[in-house]
Amino acid sequence: MVFRFAVAVFCLVFAFDVVALARDPSWTILPGLFVGWVVIDFCSGLVHMLLDYVPVPARMRLDLLYFAPNRVTPEYQRQREEILGAIGPFWRIAHNFKYHHPRPNALGKRTLKQLCAETLYFAALPAALALALAAIFAPPPPWAMAAGISMVIGALFIQYFHSTLHRREPPGFIVVMRRLHLLMTPEAHQLHHDVQDNSFAIIAGWTNPLLDRIFRRLVAMGICRAENLEPPRSEATRDLVTERHRSVAVEP
């Protein structure tokens, strides 16, 4: 119910933004759309970097989900709902990014609602509302309005675009956008999954050279540390790993 209401409000506000832009046609709209896509591509990589390397507090018990040996049991589903329901949206998104690395194909199986709900609530809808208020009280130049609209679209569908990089058969419009170089290819994104220390952008990939330089600097400063790619193991998950190794050792 909340999601449907947010979608309805977003559609109305976003339509207002587009109409406001159309009322003041200008040749600067096209470069503005490009500028917005560059900015949101950079933001996607910066957020990705942050969520990959942010240290997860042990009290959140996310290791029980991350290291779970069996994720199709009712017990796992119950535990997942309990743990994720007790933490805020930031840590849920961080968990999704960390969980995604060893299981990349899981992202491609999620629904549009699962992929876009939190980006709608915390990014796209507030940004669209801010644009609408600006258009009413302090109309920005056409290029800036176009850039804002481009960023809203990218912010809303950032995880959806990411998910299509892990699908065997993406929708036709995604294929077209890749051919136009507006979205990155699975091959380009695989560079990140190979080593997880480069290629953080997950929209077009245009800003990856800059993001890679920022990442190397953060590593040198000790801010991005490899051990933070996974949640810290509790005694329970250490026991699971030990038991798993024992069972493998006794197999004929």
Image (spheres, helix red, strand yellow):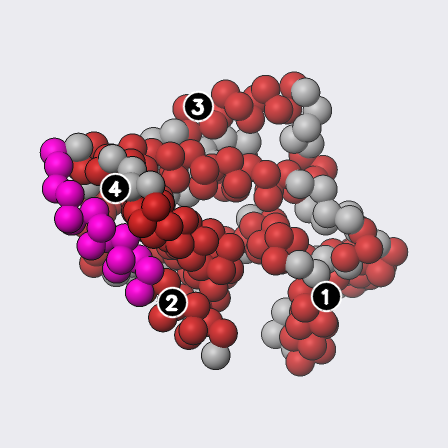
Outermost residue toward the right in this view: 235
C-alpha span from label 3 to label 1: 36 Å
For disc 1, the marked residue is 86
The residue range painted magenta reads: 12-27
Please count the marks in the image.
Answer: 4
Q: Position of residue 71 (x, y in %)?
A: 63, 69
Callout 4 touching callout 3 (CB < 8 Å):
no
**Which residue is at a point 66% across and 72% down the rendered structure image?**
81
For disc 3, the marked residue is 210
> Which circle, 1 or 4, is nearer the viewer?
4
| Depth order, front residue of 251/152 | 152
> Which circle, 3 or 2, is nearer the viewer?
2
> Which circle, 3 or 1, is nearer the viewer?
1
Identify which amino acid the numbered label 3 is placed on. Leu
Mark 1 closeness class: few <14, some 14–19, many ≥20 residues within 10 Å = few
109 displayed left or right of 168: right
Under tag 4, what secondary structure? helix
